[in-house]
Every structure is written in C-alpha cells, then in structure tokens.
C-alpha cells in the first residue's frame, strides 16, 4: 500500500501516518514511521525526526493458546504465588529443532535427559520443595474459599516470611499454610472464619488457631479488628433473607460501633444477632437456629446478643417495649 504527500510523491506505507505531528524542518504534516528501521521521517523533505523508535503496538504473531486473539508483547505477570515467581523456563515436549526438523536418536536421548533434569532442578533443595508444596496447598484452599488474587498474594508473602524465619521446623506445612491464608484474610478484611479455613483442608480448628497465634507472635504482626458488617451479607444469603433486611442489619452494626457497644463481642455473633433483630423489625423472621448455623455460632450467642441489642437500641430502632416471643427453633 502507498501513501501520497502534498507533492503527490509516492512512498510505501509501513505504519500509521502521524497526522497530528508536524515536521520540525518544513512544518508539513507528512510524517511517516518505518516499522523496519524504527525511523520517523518526513516524506516531504526527508528530515529524520527520530530513529530507532520502539514500537508500542501489539505483536504481528501470537504464540499463545488464544489462536491469534492475544497479541500483547509481554508475557504473564510475575506472581509471588509461584515458587519461581513465574520466571522459570522449561524444555518443551517437541523433539524438533528451530527449523522444524526432527532430532536424530542420539540428540533425542540427550534432550530427554536434559528435560528430566530441568524438571527436577527447580525444587532440588528442602526449602524449595517445602515452598512448592505449601503454595499448591494455598492455591487449593483459596479456590475452595473463593478468595481474590490479592489475598493469595498476601498469604504467599506471609508463608515465605515464616519459612525464612525458620517457623516451619517441627510444624505441619499444611497447618502453617492455612494459618497464613487466615492471616491474609484478616489483614485484607476478607470475611472468612477459622472454621471455613479448617474445613477447606480437613484440619482441626484449634490447630489452625494455634499456628495463627504463632505467626502473630513470631512475626510481630498486627491485625485490624474484624468488621461484623462484612459478615452480614454472607449470613443473609445463606438463610435466604432479603437485601432490605441485610441493609438494616448493617445499619444496626454501625450504630453499635458508634455507641461502642460492640467492644469485646465476637464479630460473627454480633452480625448474626443484628441480622436476627433486623428480620424481626422488617417482618422476615428466621429462627435462631437457622441464623446460628449459617454464622457458625451457637443459638445461645445469638439469643444473648439479640437481647443486649434490643435493650440498648430498642428505643432508637422504634421497637415496642413489650418484647415479642423469641423464635428459638
């Protein structure tokens, strides 16, 4: 394809014409970029504006699995969730050279040996093997719990720090992995409980809590106070309450925080009691047993927190003085 300048001179088109730029020599808008040499020159006077410029556009060929859809220049981003940060290479399974010719028998045997050692070498030491197992377990638990990539990155960072400080000696890899994931969720304020973490990998809840306390103590970590309001929607969806009730329960939680009533109370128990109270106010009453099972707390906890909320906030929420009968089961 050819482009024409103002003097009707013909020149090959190698890239998009920069019509918004003017030539600093003649002032005409006839700049053209040559993709082969990287030069930006004026087709009118021949003045070379820049040379060896970098093409910021997509590749013309795609070597990925997208069959030509992805033409980005960069590869996959590095991630701390991979043992090698995603920077290692591997010898492919194809026994062909760059020109497509098949290897002869001696060369094929040599490539097979190289491929075998290439697979073994990344996790040769004990620490590398430990890290490989732990990151796989973290990935499996994160998939079961449906957490974001940011939580996975934070969990991998915490585990790597614990491994560097020697906290894994004499302890379970899976246990410290679960504790690191729970610490990452607490740090990012992701609403998950110890019971959820333990259930994702068939672990003992007390063992995960013990490993979590070890991480906090040995690594001098401070965690933000858990927000009870972030657990409301999760409990409401499990018991089938409407969005209106969930919003009312969040409002109740915020009022308890303003009045400092929530101090020293379990966030999950407070969220469950607030949701039960909101259901009473909006006329969508669920049993305490249903809400307690959805929240992972006992019915006694829900009942006691509900009575406390009603006594402290009953007048502000417009509840009548005569308390309705509590639906226990």
Image (tube, rainbow, N blue to C red):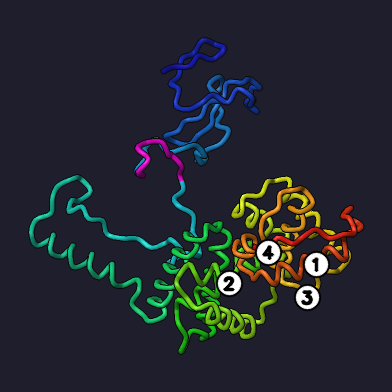
Quadrant housing residue 112: bottom left
Dot 1 alpha-carbon crowd within 10 angstroms: few under 14, some 14 to 19, many 20 or more: some
In this image, 155 relative to 89: left or right? right
**Residue 289 coordinates in the image, percent (x, y):** 63, 63
Dot 4 alpha-carbon crowd within 10 angstroms: few under 14, some 14 to 19, many 20 or more: few
Element under disc 1: helix
Quadrant housing residue 69: top left
Mark 2 and mark 1: Cα distance apart in space: 26 Å
**In front of the other: 98 or 83:** 83
Which residue was labeled with disc 3?
Answer: 264
Please tell me whether residue 165 belongs to the stretch shown in magenta: no
**In this rendering, the label closer to the viewer, 4 or 2:** 4
Marks 2 and 1 close (CB-CB < 8 Å): no
- Please report the residue visible at 12 percent of the width from the left and 64 percent of the height from the top: 109
Tell me the number on the disc at residue 307.
1
Q: Quadrant of the C terminus?
A: bottom right
**In this rendering, the label closer to the viewer, 3 or 4:** 4
In this image, 120 relative to 113: left or right? right
Which residue was labeled with disc 4?
Answer: 328
Mark 3 and mark 4: Cα distance apart in space: 24 Å
**In this rendering, the label closer to the viewer, 2 or 1:** 1
Element under disc 4: loop
Q: Quadrant of the N terminus?
A: top left
């Amino acid at each position: 394809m050819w482009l024409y300048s103002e003097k009707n001179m013909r020149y090959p088109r190698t890239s998009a014409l920069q019509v918004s730029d003017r030539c600093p020599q003649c002032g005409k808008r006839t700049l053209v970029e040559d993709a082969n040499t990287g030069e930006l020159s004026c087709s009118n006077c021949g003045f070379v504006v820049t040379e060896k410029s970098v093409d910021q556009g997509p590749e013309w060929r795609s070597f990925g699995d997208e069959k030509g859809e992805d033409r980005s220049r960069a590869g996959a981003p590095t991630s701390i969730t991979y043992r090698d940060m995603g920077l290692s290479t591997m010898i492919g399974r194809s026994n062909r050279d760059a020109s497509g010719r098949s290897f002869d028998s001696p060369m094929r045997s040599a490539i097979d040996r190289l491929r075998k050692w290439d697979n073994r070498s990344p996790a040769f030491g004990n620490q590398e093997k430990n890290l490989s197992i732990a990151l796989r377990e973290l990935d499996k638990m994160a998939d079961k719990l449906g957490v974001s990539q940011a939580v996975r990155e934070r969990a991998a960072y915490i585990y790597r720090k614990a491994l560097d400080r020697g906290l894994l000696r004499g302890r379970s890899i899976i246990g410290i992995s679960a504790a690191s994931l729970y610490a990452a969720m607490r740090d990012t304020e992701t609403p998950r409980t110890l019971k959820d973490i333990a259930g994702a990998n068939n672990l003992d809840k007390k063992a995960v809590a013990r490993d979590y306390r070890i991480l906090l103590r040995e690594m001098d970590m401070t965690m933000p106070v858990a927000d009870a309001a972030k657990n409301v929607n999760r409990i409401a969806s499990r018991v089938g309450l409407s969005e209106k009730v969930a919003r009312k329960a969040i409002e109740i939680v915020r009022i308890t925080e303003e009045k400092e009533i929530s101090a020293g109370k379990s966030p999950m128990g407070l969220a469950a009691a607030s949701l039960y109270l909101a259901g009473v106010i909006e006329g969508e009453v669920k049993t305490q047993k249903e809400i307690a099972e959805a929240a992972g707390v006992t019915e006694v906890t829900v009942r006691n927190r509900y009575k406390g909320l009603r006594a402290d906030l009953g007048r502000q929420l417009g509840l009548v003085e005569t308390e309705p009968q509590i639906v226990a089961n």
